[in-house]
Amino acid sequence: MTSLLKTIDSGKKAGAAAPARQAKPETIKEFEFTARDFERVRTLIYKRAGIALADSKHEMVYSRLARRLRATGIRSFEAYLDSLENRPDSEEWEAFTNALTTNLTSFFREAHHFPILADHVRKLSEPITIWCAASSTGEEPYSIAMTLCEALGTMTPQAHVIATDIDTNVLTTASNGIYALDRLDKMEPERARRFFLRGKGAQEGLVRVRPELRQMVTFKQLNLLSDDWPVSGPFDAIFCRNVMIYFDKPTQGKILARFAPLMKPNALLFAGHSENFLYVSDAFKLRGKTVYELDPSRVGTHRLVARPIEK
Ligand SMILES: C[S@@+](CC[C@H](N)C(=O)[O-])C[C@H]1O[C@@H](n2cnc3c(N)ncnc32)[C@H](O)[C@@H]1O
């Protein structure tokens, strides 16, 4: 349980970089980490996951990957990166990718989206299917599931949430559905009571998602960059929030062009607060703040025309 809780944090990895004041001076770093090593990491994670790491992430990358060097017993970044490059099927690729994702999330994050989702699903006939495309530790897909229960007036609606992420560690946490009690601090007490069980004794300070809610959500690994997506629509809504910011515009455009044919004509696409999809795809139009719908002029033809805007 303790190790579970370590992953349910503010998005930092366990053992993430200490504040700058406590950082070891460059000269006494445990491993040499050159500008070339950093460039190699950037290239590898960009090709693997689409994540474009900024220059400012140098220290973060060192701190997260130094743990992989310790775990694997490899004594230099150069040798570690060589071994990844030379063994494309190595299991270490998974740990490398998990180490470099950022998983910040919370229940009902960007709260204005959930009443919009509730209104949307009330107008639909069941069964309803929603894809949460970067679900992190699970707070987002469970918030979607809670909204479905509330909007449809039952703990067991004919509704299903497919929750995917590239990071296998966060998927394990999400699938367990166990959280530190303080993750519910901002949730209305009535909602918390309805959807969570409180731990007692050794589980004091923890909550578990109720089984009915857990059963509404299926977790799967999915790399948005991969050609092969193990999901099939059509979806009534797609949540793709706070992940596109890590991708460059051509990558965003390609992903959006693949979303369009997976959506029902009246489906909604929810984006993160700093993400703007209008400049990267011609398939969507804005419905409200960071909420998109398929452009009606494309509906029926979007399978053919949805494409990234070349920039
Ligand atoms: C900042 S979290 C956002 C979580 C949630 N959507 C939210 O808004 O609270 C970004 C998530 O995107 C995932 N991610 C990064 N690259 C990905 C990729 N190529 N395919 C799928 N998920 C990815 C990360 O593992 C991480 O859990």
Image: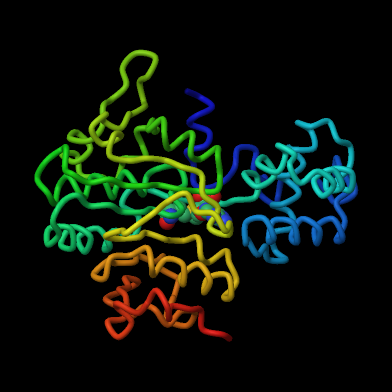
Residue 74 in the image, given as x and y percentages of width and height? 86, 35
> Residue 225 vs residue 150: left or right?
right
Q: Residue furthest left?
A: 153
| Image vertical order of residue 145 relative to residue 110, above or below | above
* Image quadrant containing the C terminus: bottom right
Nearest the camera: 163 or 12?
A: 163
The scheme the figure's colours follow is: rainbow
Residue 20 in the image, given as x and y percentages of width and height? 70, 52
| Image vertical order of residue 108 relative to residue 258, above or below | above
Residue 68 in the image, given as x and y percentages of width and height? 74, 38
Q: Residue furthest top?
A: 201
**Residue at (37%, 33%) from the top-left corner?**
177
| Image vertical order of residue 274 relative to residue 183, above or below | below
> Residue 62 vs residue 266: left or right?
right
**Residue at (31%, 42%) from the top-left corner?**
185
> Residue 120 vs residue 139: left or right?
left
Residue 304 in the image, given as x and y percentages of width and height? 42, 78
**Residue at (27%, 45%) from the top-left corner?**
160
**Residue at (29%, 47%) from the top-left corner?**
143
Nearest the camera: 55 or 229?
A: 229
Residue 286 in view here: no
> Residue 107 vs residue 275: left or right?
left
| Image vertical order of residue 74 relative to residue 248, above or below | above
Residue 227 in view here: yes
Nearest the camera: 221 or 196?
A: 221
